[in-house]
Amino acid sequence: MSNPINNDVDSLPYVLAVSGASAQQLAERSLQLLLENDRHVHLILSRGAHEVWSAELEVHVPVEPEAQARFWRDRLKCSKGTLECHRWNDQAASIASGSVRTRGMVIVPCSMGTVGRIAAGVATDLVERCADVHLKEGRPLVLAPREMPWNLIHLRNLTSLAEAGARIAPPIPAWYTQPKTLDDMVDFLVVRLFDGLGESLKPIQRWRDTDA
């Protein structure tokens, strides 16, 4: 008799969370590459992320999930993959439960306020609740903190999260790739972010790699 349980990790969805930090372009490109690679994505924009999109990019991202999904499909011009959007305060969402299996969660960009609340075990919204779930279930949680310099409180919070099992992956550029454009740099940062989850989103120039 075959085992009815699906153990194919590649088929599980990602949770992609976006907090209210600068560098929203990293989140957008992450979403685009995941969908273009036919992945299933649960997307959560925090309340702060909506405000940053409006303030920095002069773009209004719809809050209502179905309207937001249409917004991203139109903006990214991508019909591949599966996209489910969630309100930042919907703690009754499926992904708020540990019984819903995922491949992992990435928070990009991740504000230090979000880092601090997750480290303290405080879940004021769906982003923080999902992060707590991934830690308690022992699933991959990757944080891309966007702040500099880091003060001692930041460092202690990040250390606590690393000790709890999170991967800390600040979006730090590499110059050996000799990027020609900002898009080149964004792609490198996003691909490196997902390297830690065993995901190969697109070819990039790696150290001493002759193939781009």
Image (cartoon, rainbow, N blue to C red):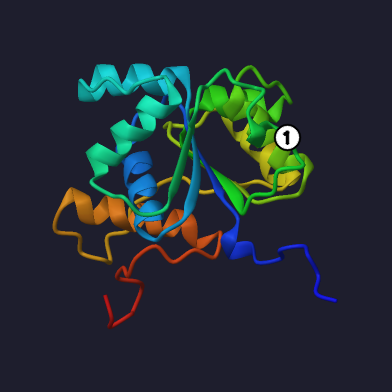
In the image, taking residue 62 as reference, residue 12 lies left or right, namely right
In the image, taking residue 2 as reference, residue 32 lies left or right, namely left
Give residue 184's position: percent from left, percent from top. 22, 56
Of 1 and 26, the residue lying toward us: 1
Query: In the rendered image, which quarter is residue 164 located in?
Result: top right
User: Against 24, is 103 above or below?
Assistant: below
Residue appearing at x 52%, y 22% in the figure: 88
User: Against 77, is 84 above or below?
Assistant: above
Residue appearing at x 58%, y 29% in the figure: 127
Does dot 1 land on a helix, a strand or a loop?
A: loop
Which kind of residue does numbered mark 1 sit on? Ser
Residue appearing at x 23%, y 38% in the figure: 75
Give residue 199's position: percent from left, percent from top. 49, 63
In the image, taking residue 61 as reference, residue 57 lies left or right, namely left
Task: Point out the residue furthest to the bottom here.
Answer: 210
Q: From where the camera sits, is residue 45 visible?
A: yes
Of 36 and 146, the residue lying toward us: 36
Query: In the rendered image, which quarter is residue 133 located in?
Result: top right
Give residue 94's position: percent from left, percent from top. 65, 34
Task: Point out the residue furthest to the right here.
Answer: 1
Quadrant into which the C terminus falls: bottom left
Q: Tell me the residue that label 1 is attached to.
A: 97
Quadrant into which the N terminus falls: bottom right
User: Against 162, is 58 above or below?
Assistant: above
Of 67 and 102, the residue lying toward us: 67
